[in-house]
Image (cartoon, grey):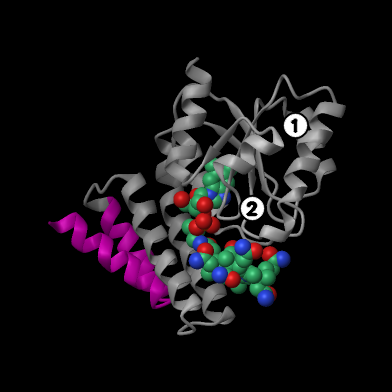
Amino acid sequence: MEIDEICERLGETIVNMDFEGAKATVREAIEKKVPNETIIDCCAKGMQEVGRRYETREYFVPELIVAGDVMKEAMDVLKPYLDASDAKKKEKIVIGTIKGDLHDIGKNIFISLMESAGFEVFDLGIDVTEDTFIEKLKETGASILGMSSLITSTIEEIKVVVKELEKAGLRDKVKVIVGGSAVSEKFAQEVGADMYALDALAGVEKCKQLIET
Ligand code: B12
């Protein structure tokens, strides 16, 4: 099927670190009316293959960084179309990668999907401290806090943020969702987060359910 073929090609452009190819293939997919979520998923699959090659030592850190940049540029091409499908409801979410962790590719995918689902996203970037999270929640009045974590040694920071939420009197006003490969359903429960999502799409579904209830 044509969509499968475009999807495969798109993934390959990420794996091959082909900036121009990735952007052109996203444009082609948009023209051929491939759904936004499918385009994001195809890029993510490419990134997963990059991760696999890193683990088997076919790729090293420079390839990871460049492939991550290709993914970002591909997402930038799609972004205006995600905003265009904006819904009326504008529930706010503050999100960031926790302190000590610089990974942001997965977080950025989640953000793109959340924006396309109509959420207003305040992205604090990477290496975000508890104070910055709390400050932004107060400033925006957001009802959801998303935290991404890929490095096992830094996940305790999620606990710290949840505690700070309690201290700031925000815990009953803000739902906490965690994601990224360092966290799990069990961990989310242990630290008192409200939700865990294995992938970005599941995360969006959980956030949607939250505002529908
Ligand atoms: C790319 C990458 C990097 C890039 C990051 C580039 C960037 N801009 O993000 C660079 C090269 C910078 C990097 C650096 C490092 N990395 Co690295 N990296 C990876 C790699 C290969 C892929 C991660 C990735 O982007 N995956 C693709 C995305 C799409 O998947 P994802 O992040 O899981 O996100 C999905 C879901 O989890 C979810 N999601 C993610 N966040 C959130 C948040 C919410 C709220 C929700 C709902 C969902 C959600 O949505 C996404 C899509 O479905 C992984 C290995 C792997 N296979 O995962 C190692 C890995 C994460 N890195 C690792 C390490 C150790 C490091 C370094 C310490 C290496 C070093 N020695 O310097 C440094 C860390 C520096 C730091 N302080 O953070 C380890 C972590 C081990 C651990 N468990 O602790 C891994 C697992 C590799 C390994 N097997 O050893 N890394």
Q: Is residue 119 visible?
A: yes
* Mark 2 or 1, nearer chain start: 1
Residue lying farthest to the top in this orientation: 213
183 with respect to 28 (left or right): right
Task: Give the magenta range.
Answer: 1-30
Q: Viewer-nearest of labels 2 and 1?
A: 2
Specify the farthest residue to the left. Answer: 1
Q: Position of residue 81 (x, y in %)?
A: 40, 44
Does 53 appear in magenta?
Answer: no
Q: Residue at x 29, y 51 (%)?
A: 30
- Residue at 43%, 64% (x, y): give it: 48
Q: Position of residue 195 (x, y in %)?
A: 57, 33
- Image side of residue 3 versus residue 189, left or right: left
Name the mark on residue 149: 2
Please count the marks in the image: 2
Q: Is mark 1 within 8 Å of ligand 1?
A: no
Q: Does dot 1 land on a helix, a strand or a loop? A: helix
Q: Give residue 177's quadrant in the image.
A: top right
Measuring from the top left, give residue 174's x and y in whole percent.
69, 25
- Give the alpha-carbon distance from disc 2 to disc 1, as whole Å: 19 Å
Whether pointer 2 and pointer 1 mark residues with C-beta atoms closer than 8 Å, the reply is no
- From the image, tell me which residue sits under label 1: 137
- Would you call the spot at circle 2 few (<14 residues within 10 Å), some (14-19), or many (20 or more)? many
Residue 154 image-quadrant placement: bottom right
Tell me: is circle 2 under 8 Å from ligand 1: yes
Q: Which residue is at a point 60% across and 49% down the rendered structure image?
A: 183
- Say if 92 sits above or below 58 in the image: above
Magenta stretch: helix, strand or loop mostly: helix
Q: Amino acid at mark 1?
A: Leu
**Mark 2: which amino acid?**
Ser
**Which quadrant of the structure image shows residue 20?**
bottom left
